[in-house]
Amino acid sequence: MKPTHKLLFVLCPMLVLGFIYYSSGKLHLHVWGQKSQRKAEITATSTSISSSATTTTTTRTTTSTTTTTATITTSTTVKRPGVKPIAARMKLDTEMESDTTVGRMVDSVYDKQGFLLQLDTKLSLELMYKYGNLSEGACKPGFAAAKMTAIYPRFAKPAPMFLDRNFKLLGKVNGYLPPFGFKTQERIIDGILTFTKHYGLGEELDSLTCKRCIIVGNGGILANKSLGSKIDDYDVVVRLNEAPVSGFGRDVGTKTTMRITYPEGAIQKPENYEKDSLFVFSAFKPLDFKWLRHMVFKEKLRGVEGFWKSVAHAVPREPNEMRILNPYFIQEAAFQFIGLPFNNGLMGKGNIPTLGTVAITMALHNCDEVAVAGFGYDMSMPHAPLHYYETVKMSAIKESWTHNISKEKEFLRKLVKANVITDLTRGI
Ligand SMILES: *[C@@H]1O[C@H](CO)[C@@H](O)[C@H](O)[C@H]1NC(C)=O
Ligand SMILES: *[C@@H]1O[C@H](CO)[C@@H](O)[C@H](O)[C@H]1NC(C)=O
Ligand SMILES: *[C@@H]1O[C@H](CO)[C@@H](O)[C@H](O)[C@H]1NC(C)=O
């Protein structure tokens, strides 16, 4: 054998071994990353317990951590007399180690979408401490995002509400066609945003350090509940499509911070628009941006083929009152939160979230507290009204090609069950 061959002969297995070592290290790191946080929590608990070794069982249970395994391990270790704090801590560590290396923990704690399986409304110790001193009813900074992260660790809060002049840099959406992004529509959007010149909620709301938002759905469940003044108490009141306010104030309130809409859903009669609300546009197909350009530049709309029902021909709003909703909320709601079919990132059967869920997703990223009202259908009452503003009955609801109402409801239930959002009408 030539020396170079010999060298190769030795080098190859080493490379392979090196790779295996590296990848196991990576795997281990991943598991460890999840564990280390728990370990820290538990270590903290066990230290606090051992430092007051004579305390009773009751205080012990109140100080134990949130996960069941942790609680059990902690109490068994502590019950044994004469165990030194360090030894107790080491025992905990090794127990956790064996637990996680099996990999059971990671799989069984979260569902397919990445949400915690066991949802409850309890606050973590950390949040209890953070909000403990606030007076009853005060806005809790960061509450919705913190609760969301607790049940869905992948949640990352930053995501701007509306597109601004830097929209092309939004990496999560610039590669998708509408409705999941804005690919192919960049020039139209650029033109619109140059003209509207405003990309926020307005000075007063943008400067609030804590914002409470409510998304008002259009469900008949809102009727006759006199929730109007409660809805008006929120800093940001979001309404959808053509849901009227005038004449329904007692039940749905009178304040509208923004109205999110797509062409077919927009109010058609100019006199039906309320004063002082932002017109927030959400696109579901490429053609929708063309429509928006006409509305913003107040151009006459010629030819309306391509829309699935008649659309408004004018929107009585100044350009500085118009916004484009970040399409990321449609994408995230569809593929990450609800788990609708990805379909190569294109619109397909049953993969479009409803506007209400898109609005809730937006609020999770941009509001400190999030409430909803008028969501959910009670199918056991087919004669109840479908919407609060018309007499169409629940039984008129059809199988939808675009939406998957039942899967969407599963997602919204998780949010309500874990108290990430508050459902004023309890329809979800
Ligand atoms: C809450 O109040 C207590 C007692 O007044 C104080 O010691 C503690 O630091 C406060 N906590 C927060 C998060 O402000
Ligand atoms: C609300 O109350 C009015 C007047 O009492 C009644 O006519 C209407 O049917 C009620 N609507 C619902 C949804 O209960
Ligand atoms: C909704 O999702 C369920 C479960 O994935 C599926 O069986 C059903 O066909 C979907 N409905 C629509 C309208 O796509």
Image (spheres, rainbow, N blue to C red):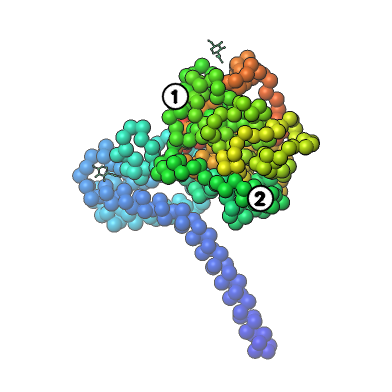
Q: Amino acid at mark 1?
A: Ser
- 243 vs 44: above or below: above
Residue 113 is situated, as x and y percent measured from the top left of the image, at 57, 43
Residue under circle 1?
Answer: 229
Q: Nearer the viewer, residue 117 or 68?
A: 117
Name the residue: 28% across, 41% down.
60
| Left or right of 280, for residue 236 | left
Q: Nearer the viewer, residue 203 or 218?
A: 203
Residue under circle 2?
Answer: 191
Q: Disc 1 and disc 2: Cα gap in Å?
A: 39 Å
Location of the N terminus (image quadrant): bottom right
Determine whether the residue tagged by mark 2 lies in a helix, strand or loop.
helix
Give me the disc on residue 355.
none
- 10 Å crowding of disc 2: few (<14), some (14-19), many (20+): few
Q: Nearer the viewer, residue 289 or 315?
A: 315
Is residue 233 visible from the viewing direction of this image?
Answer: yes
Residue 118 is situated, as x and y percent measured from the top left of the image, at 48, 38
Choose top left, top right, bottom left or bottom right for residue 13: bottom right
Choose top left, top right, bottom left or bottom right for residue 17: bottom right
Residue 133 is situated, as x and y percent measured from the top left of the image, at 29, 39
* Residue mark closest to the camera, 1 vs 2: 2
Is residue 325 visible from the viewing direction of this image?
Answer: no
Determine whether the residue tagged by mark 1 lies in a helix, strand or loop.
helix
Name the residue: 46% across, 28% down.
232
| Left or right of 36, for residue 43 | left
